[in-house]
Image (spheres, helix red, strand yellow):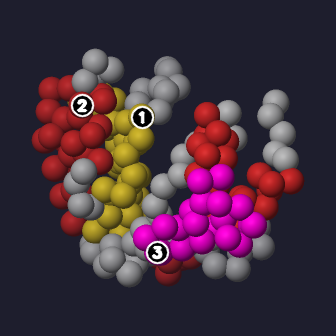
């Protein structure tokens, strides 16, 4: 198993809340760490190659964009077409994440995971329908899992009872 070095820990701490919204964010992070932006870029790439990071990417503020409803839409897509179709799905404006994932058969046949957003549940469902139409005959199955509540200041994970679920629904 790979271990994080002292610089790796400092780099993760410096980027945990995101990269600065400037034209050369790695230079800003590097300056804070006493290295060049190139060193930051190279180390992040190295950490990704080593499997220490899955990816470096943008995380949009969905609420500020007007997307108050989010759903995980999962798809069982023909493996020979998933790269081509995944690129098209990922380019849709109401899709913030689109990833190929391994199936976990027999219980979980899905290999394409997308996070879809809308101003309402109906709008998010329309995005999922748009994706289904785009995938067409390459899609053998799908499911749509709505994110229904965010618990703030929760002290423990526990199932919501029906009354709590009704209060938390958007």
Give the percent coordinates (x, y) of residue 128.
24, 51
Question: Which residue is the site of mark 2?
Answer: 84
Left or right: 151 with respect to 69?
right
Q: Residues within 10 Å of mark 1 (few under 14, many from 20)?
A: some
86, above or below 127, in the image? above
> In front: 130, or 85?
85
Left or right: 65 with respect to 23?
left
| The residue stretch that appears in magenta | 20-39
Give the percent coordinates (x, y) of residue 77.
30, 28
Q: CA distance from mark 1 to mark 3?
A: 30 Å
| SS label for mark 2 | helix
Residue drawn at x 66%, y 47% is 43
Are the residues flagged by discs 3 and 2 in contact, CB closer than 8 Å? no
| SS label for mark 3 | loop
| SS label for mark 1 | strand
Q: CA distance from mark 2 to mark 1?
A: 11 Å
Question: Which residue is the site of mark 3?
Answer: 22
Residue drawn at x 30%, y 28% is 82
22, above or below 58, in the image? below
The answer to which quarter of the image holds residue 143 is: top left
Question: Which residue is the site of mark 1?
Answer: 100
Quadrant of the image for the N terminus?
Answer: top right
């Amino acid at each position: 198993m790979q271990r994080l070095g002292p610089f790796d820990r400092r780099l993760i701490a410096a980027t945990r809340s995101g990269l600065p919204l400037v034209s050369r964010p790695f230079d800003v992070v590097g300056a804070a760490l006493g290295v060049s932006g190139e060193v930051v870029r190279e180390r992040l790439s190295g950490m990704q190659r080593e499997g220490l990071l899955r990816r470096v990417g943008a995380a949009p503020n969905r609420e500020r964009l007007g997307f108050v409803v989010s759903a995980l839409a999962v798809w069982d897509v023909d493996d020979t077409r998933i790269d081509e179709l995944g690129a098209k799905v990922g380019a849709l404006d109401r899709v913030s994440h689109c990833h190929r994932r391994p199936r976990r058969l027999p219980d979980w046949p899905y290999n394409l995971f997308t996070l879809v957003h809308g101003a309402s549940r109906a709008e998010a469902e329309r995005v999922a329908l748009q994706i289904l139409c785009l995938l067409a005959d390459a899609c053998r199955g799908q499911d749509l899992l709505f994110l229904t509540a965010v618990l703030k200041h929760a002290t423990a994970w526990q199932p919501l009872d029906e009354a709590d679920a009704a209060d938390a629904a958007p």
